[in-house]
Image (cartoon, helix red, strand yellow):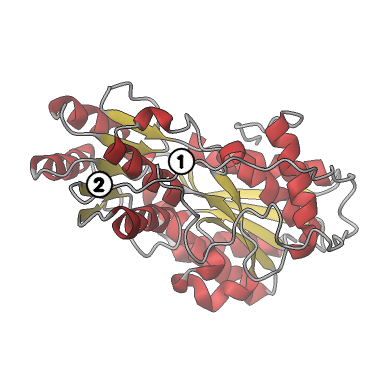
Amino acid sequence: MVGVLALAGCAKDSGGSGGSSNVATVGSCVTATAPSAGSAAAASSSAASGKVDGSSMRVGLAFDIGGRGDASFNDAAAAGVDKAKTDLGVKDVRESTAGANEDEAAKEQRLTQLATDGYNPVVAVGFAYADAVKAVSAKFAGTKFAIIDDDSITAPNVTPLVFSEEQGSFLAGVAAVYKSKNCHVGFVGGVNTPLIQKFQAGYEQGAKAASSKVVVEKEYLTPAGDFTGFQDPAKGNVVAAAEISKGADVVYQAAGASGKGVFEAAKSAGVLAIGVDSDQYNQKTVETTRDVIITSMLKRVDVAVYDYLAAVATNTLGSLPKRFDLKVDGVGYATSGGKINDIVPVLEGYKQEIISGKITVSTTAGN
């Protein structure tokens, strides 16, 4: 399989760059001694090199709500398909986007239409498609499906693309503590689901690993089942502003397109923010607030989607990792803007502790 680099413009999960010779700025919030980075490096999630011809594939891409332009989850998936166009020669791609709170029938119809029209493989972006993928894949046994963020389907023609979001979020929590002046940080989740709770769980654990005195605010925009929480920047702004008013001076968002509002609230208040999924410092749709983004937790959906398409083209689906974690560079952090260059050695130290198993990151959030 063709080797793959992360989305162009995204900072890599620095194993060497970012200034290992820099000295971390340790504020009064930090109470723990950071582990040594060591010399171990994460393995790439992409397999061996070699020319892959994907020109005959017709790729269907079913976006979650927000679609292209959400500066987050959907854009990352789109970037993986765009790379497949460039590197694999994929020519025919059809995209379709979910509506807010649409019913299961609409999701099934979207996938059914793609499969009926000959698109194969079909990539469903998000766990909200789980029931629809299960139903439609059973009717189209000859069509390959992939679903991001769900591994509940055991059908032979369905490939799950899942991640260790809690591991990358742990590093975001460490970064937040090192950059906080108030020793008070915040988390804004889009929808209160087990998946987004993984982001909260890792973030809190990372923050508390670096500091025994940090205060962590956490809030969700909508309860489980109401997916508008991923597409409501105004509400994201209000909730983030409330956390900031309580003293949080670094706010991490896992809220899809609603994250734009979190960044706006941070900029208005003169505090810092942490992005999610894509390297949001380099996203055009949030460029007016990029100066407050110190890093982003990279969930390499682009890499997973690209690797999946390359594996379909080469009939090597069995080579894909069962879960895209820190060890295979499936999650990480961005260094764009240079705002965390001084703490890269700190983050690398904690990263190696997680990879080695010395630190186990919880997937379950506290209250």
Disc 1: which residue: 48
Q: Residues within 10 Å of mark 1 (few under 14, many from 20)?
A: few
131 is higher (above) or lower (below) than 267: above
Question: What residue do we see at 53% from left, 78% from top?
Answer: 288
Q: Quadrant of residue 104?
A: top left
Q: Residues within 10 Å of mark 2 (few under 14, many from 20)?
A: few
Image coords of residue 36 (percent x, y):
84, 44
Image coords of residue 76 (percent x, y):
42, 55
Q: Using the rendered image of the protein, determine whether residue 99 is visible from the camera's viewpoint.
A: yes
Disc 2: which residue: 102
Q: Looking at the image, which residue sits at the far bottom?
A: 288
Between residues 140 and 13, which one lies in front from this camera angle?
13
Between residues 319 and 204, which one lies in front from this camera angle?
319
Image coords of residue 182 (percent x, y):
82, 61
In space, the residues marked 2 and 1 are separated at their CA atoms by 40 Å
Q: Quadrant of the N terminus?
A: top left
Q: Is residue 366 left or right of residue 67?
A: right
- 2 or 1: mark nearer the eye: 1
Q: Looking at the image, which residue sits at the far left?
A: 117
283 is higher (above) or lower (below) than 277: below
Q: Quadrant of residue 232?
A: bottom left
Question: What residue do we see at 23% from left, 34% from top?
Answer: 144
Q: Which kind of residue does numbered mark 1 sit on?
A: Ala
Question: What residue do we see at 24% from left, 54% from top?
Answer: 90
Question: What residue do we see at 48% from left, 32% from top?
Answer: 321
Q: Is residue 244 left or right of residue 57?
A: right
Image coords of residue 39 (percent x, y):
77, 43
